[in-house]
Amino acid sequence: MKIKDYFIPDFYYSSVLRIKPEFFAENNIRFLICDIDNTLATYESRIADEERRRWLDLVESTGVRIAFISNNSERRVYTFNTMHGYFTESRAGKPFTRKLRRLMKLMDAVPEQTAILGDQIFTDVLCAKRAGIRAVLVMSMDVKGKPFLKMKKFFERYFINAYRRRTEK
């Protein structure tokens, strides 16, 4: 694999709400490890909104096992997960894979049936690729007032365009 391939997602959507629950079965994804911040909730939201909670329930109802992984604090992840009860890892250190692999072991997940769902290429996508699993990238929910995140999004455009070129073929 070329170095740039570590940064190109396998799938890209504008929002988790655009991903139909049957997408996972169609792509043999039985284990979905979700980032939280700006993927399922804004940084200011303690929990997922009703639409995203309903989406998680629909995905789970198709037989997909879900877990949460975040570079955020244990308190943030615990609070977010109270309505769900999934396996979690906080302070994950993405793109490093140690906590991701620990989470996969807890879930009895195999790499060929596992994907990370997240909003950042340099953490979520790179972590997935380093672990040998698929990466589902979504647009960040909110980058207003976050200059560092805006800067990262500027650099991510190259890899999103590379994804688009690949999928157009």
Image (cartoon, rainbow, N blue to C red):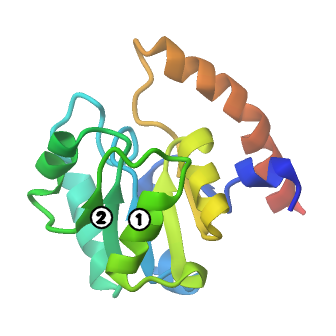
Give the residue displayed 46% in from the left and 49% down from the top: 15
Q: Which residue corresponds to mark 1?
A: 33
In the drawing, does residue 94 fall left or right of residue 9? left
Q: Inspect this view and state whether residue 92 appears.
A: yes
Decide: is 145 above or below 153: above
CA separation in Å, label 2 and label 1: 14 Å
Which residue type carries mark 2? Trp
Element class at badge 2: helix
Choose between 146 and 74: the one closer to the eye: 74
Question: Residue 162 appears at what percent x and percent y?
Answer: 82, 46
Q: Inspect this view and state whether residue 21 appears.
A: no
Which numbered disc, 2 or 1, marks the residue that appears first in the sequence?
1
Q: Quadrant of the N terminus?
A: bottom right
How many labels sit on residues? Answer: 2
Question: Residue 145 appears at what percent x and percent y?
Answer: 40, 12
User: Which quadrant would residue 120 be assigned to in this image?
Assistant: top right
Q: Which mark is residue 55?
A: 2
Q: Nearer the viewer, mark 2 or mark 1?
A: 1
